[in-house]
Amino acid sequence: MSLPDVVSRAQWLEARERLLAEEKELTRKRDALNADRRRLPMVRITENYVFEGPTGKTDLAGLFGDSRQLIVQHVMFGPDWEQPCPSCSVAISEMTPSLFKNLRSRDTNFVLVSRAPYAKIAEAATERNWDVPWYSSHGSDFNFDFEVSFDKSNPPLRYNYREQPWLLEADAINELPGLSCFLREGDDVFHTYSTFARGAEYIGNAYTLLDLTALGRQESWEEPKDRVQTDRAGDPSFTA
């Protein structure tokens, strides 16, 4: 791999300022996109999905705990798999108790769901010393309905919002990654958002996960303003 060019400090600053302008533009576009995501319509969930976790069986509403929002990471771990997906495993290994705590402080619960039976999930978590809220949807249509598990006998097969003919190939994988977000309003549960493929690599911290939800970060500055946003000291360079 080639290394960057070596230049003078003045040349570096000139190049850095050009890049900074692009970074600020991307930040503004991301803020606007997050606002559009919060305005996305939602769909009431009517199916009675059943999950199994460390305390037994529960429904989708039960995965919320005491929170109003729920984020589900669809972890690739099929019923006939011996181990979870290596890439998913790397992401899980980087999760800390603080991530879950910080999300709950914003009225949002975060859980993992796989189609493997819970006994396999518990064994995999124990082997890796993972202390994460990981549930099984085995025997449920949850993964199929949210288009992260695939039954070759029931085409067409869709992933990332389009038909994927390659999923019908004999050696094609039958589990893929994704993130889905839900909102609870009274006794009703709504699906607000799902993202797949590279979009499912969004996990970085609690804020980037909250950006996927209907309620967002729940901070007063979230809606884009016509004026330049400022920090508490009035510095217009803080977010713009």
Image (cartoon, rainbow, N blue to C red):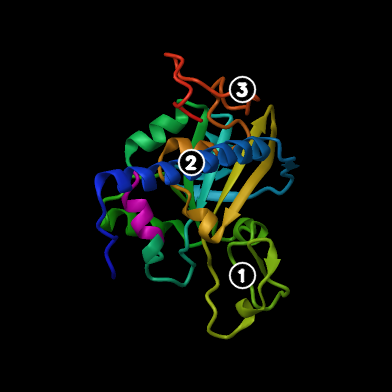
Q: Residues within 10 Å of mark 2 (few under 14, many from 20)?
A: few
Confirm whether residue 60 shows in the render: no
Q: Which of marks 2 and 1 is in front?
A: 2
In-front residue for pair 74/200: 200
Question: How many numbered discs?
Answer: 3
The image shows residue 66, relative to residue 90, as above or below, that is above
Kindly identify the amino acid type of the residue bearing the numbered disc 3: Arg
Pointers 3 and 2 in contact (C-beta within 8 Å): no
Compared across the picture, whether 85 is left or right of 48 comes to: left
Per the rendering, the mark at residue 21 is 2
Between discs 1 and 3, the one toward the N terminus: 1
Per the image, the residue denoted by label 1 is 150
Could you say which quadrant of the image residue 151 lies in? bottom right
Label 1 to label 3: alpha-carbon separation: 47 Å
In-front residue for pair 171/209: 209
Q: Nearer the viewer, mark 3 or mark 2?
A: 2
Tell me which residue sits at (37%, 52%) in the image. 92
Kindly identify the amino acid type of the residue bearing the numbered disc 2: Ala
Label 2 to label 1: alpha-carbon separation: 43 Å
Residue 177 % position (x, y): 51, 60
Q: Is the magenta stretch mostly helix, strand or loop?
A: helix
Per the image, the residue denoted by label 3 is 227
Kindly identify the amino acid type of the residue bearing the numbered disc 1: Phe
The image shows residue 147, relative to residue 165, as above or below, that is above
